[in-house]
Amino acid sequence: IEQKTTSRNPRSTVGTITEVYDYLRLLFARIGQPYCHGCGKPIQSQPASRIIEQLEALPEGTKVQLLAPIARGRKGEFRRELEKAGQDGFVRVRIDGEIMAIEDAPALEKQKKHSIELVVDRLVIRDGIRTRLADSVETSLRYGEGMLIALVDNGEQVFSERFACADCGISYPDIEPRLFSFNSPVGACPSCDGIGSKTIFDPALVIPDPSLSLADGAIEPWSGRETFMYRQTIGAVIRHLGADLQTPFAELDESVRQVLLYGTGREKIRFVYETPGQSRVVERPFEGVIPNLERRYRESSSDDVREALSAYINTIDCPDCHGSRLNRAARHVRVGDLSLPQVTAMPLRDARDWFAGLRLSGQQMAIAEKILEEIQARLGFMIEVGLDYLSLDRTAGTLSGGEAQRIRLATQIGSALVGVLYILDEPSIGLHQRDNDRLLATLRRLRDLGNSVIVVEHDEDAIRSADWVVDMGPRAGEHGGEVVAAGTLAEILKSRTLTADYLTGRKSIAVPERRAVEEGHPMLGVDGACEHNLKSVRARFPMARFSCVTGVSGSGKSTLTLDTLYRGLARAKGLKAERVGRHAELIGADLIDKIIDIDQSPIGRTPRSNPATYTGIFTAIRELFAQVPESRSRGYKPGRFSFNVKGGRCETCQGDGIIKVEMHFLPDVYVHCEACQGARYNRETLDIRYKGRNIAEVLDMTVDEAAEFFEAIPALKNRLATLQHVGLGYIRLGQQATTLSGGEAQRVKLSKELARRATGDTLYILDEPTTGLHFDDVAKLLEVLHTLVDQGNTVIVIEHNLDVIKTADWIVDMGPEGGDRGGEIVVTGTPEDVASCEASWTGRYLKGCLRG
């Protein structure tokens, strides 16, 4: 059970992954009660007689066409159905919205979805029409399997024998499972096609500072234009609307702001464009800022233009379905007192409680009993592994690797298999100690069912809970690869391994002397943070101190620290940042001169990226090889030693060292390049040697080997020393970036920043930097972070590791729970302050850690 995110597909959600959504669809289809979206009353079945009465009551002279749907959003050619309809006497048919003679029907594409309705009758409402109308309605309902579409003048009305509002005339299609599927055209919101969101040019990004006037450049995408065209255009629009260019945008009338953003429609405006020597008058509608940006983005063939415009694009909930993904009919079917979108938006713990308290009639319970058992069991499994704060509509792409792993684990528990070997890679990542206890209980349950569970883990509680421990070492990389101890916990503790040293207390991470945070100490922070589950949070972080943001999973740590504080400060410093989390005010942006977010994203997404290229070490190595006498005599420049440039690289594999063989319907096969044997360079380049090593052999060195090899080269020695300092002495210089873990990638980035000249007043933000680290590696990392603070920098870390938390100068503890029950600051202060707070989950676990 790996940690990779389950799916980046926006249609994939927690509910679909765990199959809970399938049971919910079935539940709502079988016992759901539709409600009219017009009057809100329950919709009952509508018999044919009622349909006839409604059509007969139309004004005299109304033209009506009665259609019988035989296919609605289904794939196929439908040749047999159309042939049978012709044999039954039907003459006309509507295919995908176009009415035509049956004999003129085109061949339909088999893999495309089609909607087909037979034209049963065309008539005009008048006296004496009832008999004909009744026959045609009954025929339509028979061929349409209970459904009928009436084209009244230019409008369309759907009738169903089963569900229709007697007061409003609003009718719903059959209540079937696919009506509740956002992957089906029958159930998907037509506006967003079931995605639940839309990508738009966001007015908040187009007008980032509404306090500016139009004359001062309030419209940011147009503020840098060198021509007078845009200024004259805005001036003409403002004059036409009777407003003032000097008025702050926020103080303009709402109608004026709407015209500026979205245009005048068909209304024309007189534009006078004056250039030296001539004046030109044009009368035309004003396009509007946002439609103009949309058109330029759509029509531009320049990647640079599209990238520049993408800075003003944002993703919002679909305004029609409000992010629920379902169409209007599906959103208005309820079980109990809730609709399907309302159920899927609830945190899992609340959803479980709601289902447990659901009261159904005898017949409904008989139908739904088995469905409810399956739903509650699956919800229970996810809650057991600490995911109670998630909701079923949470998209898979927003899940962390640890969350995705635990969802798959919960699915396995639900399968109740016996005799299975489960292997998990660091399932405790991203878990608070409280949630980690739940996870360990779940793993023990899997074991007790009769399964074998192997966990790759650094967490102390996990190690102490294990029946058998295999300790690898003695060090990392080429200095490891051996089993240094194996046995029960008691046997491991008797060994002299590095792991045993920390478990027994022979080695430990000491609590450092606190750096005081006095009253009036300079602070960074944010007021009124209310993004996602944050509840108008007021947070402060002391300058030149080491701060930790803690709290149970889903409590709002990343939303506060990354989405709001980091993005807000980055935007304030003129850096390009994604949408900033909603907040009232940013505090202390003037106190820092640089902000660096060191996350766990890969340092490169191709095999060509490696630690040497990312940190700049490779540039210095290539320059060094270019200075070798043999290189100079041959005229080789630094570019000769790059495997990304023609000349020095092996052209057979184009510098990859491997060749990909496409196998079409089988997985691609990668083989070593026979020409260079994986070295990446041609023979002439490999002839050049520095101290007996060629460029390929240097890239194959570990950081520790390279540090000794280049000891006399200051530019290389210092950068290699920083990699060693963060505990990466075992990785190879040319190791493919795609093979580095998230924690290793994060430490490579940290080493790159450490190698820069220290300026002080820099803010470093790290998200769970201890991911994948052994106790000894955590100690090394803390040494680095505290060194940064000693140099006058500010470090903020999102962390669950108690060894890191106990060394912090300042803690901001989020909670008290996850999801909608979180989003508040429970306590702030020193670790001792947090440990004394009874309301803090972090404090309860930290208390024992500080005491120890």
Image (cartoon, helix red, strand yellow):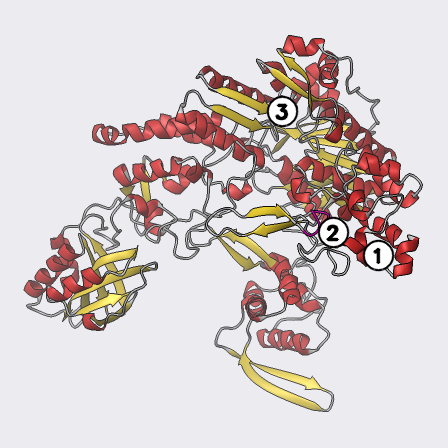
Q: Foreground residue, 599 or 604?
A: 604
Residue under pointer 2: 572
Residue under pointer 3: 457
Tell me if label 2 and label 3 are in contact, CB under 8 Å: no
Instruction: Tell which circle, 2 or 3, labels the residue nearer the N-terminal end.
Output: 3
Residue 127 on image: x %, y %: 8, 69
Which label sits in the foreground, 1 or 3?
1
- 165 is higher (above) or lower (below) than 781: below
Residue 752 on image: x %, y %: 80, 43
CA distance for labels 2 and 3: 40 Å
Give, as a three-letter code, the residue at label 2: Ala
- Residue range corresponding to the magenta coloring: 675-681
* Label 2: how many Cα within 10 Å (few below 14, some 14–19, many 20+): some
Residue 289 on image: x %, y %: 59, 68
Picture residue at 54% right of the left edge, 71% below the top = 263
Residue under pointer 1: 638
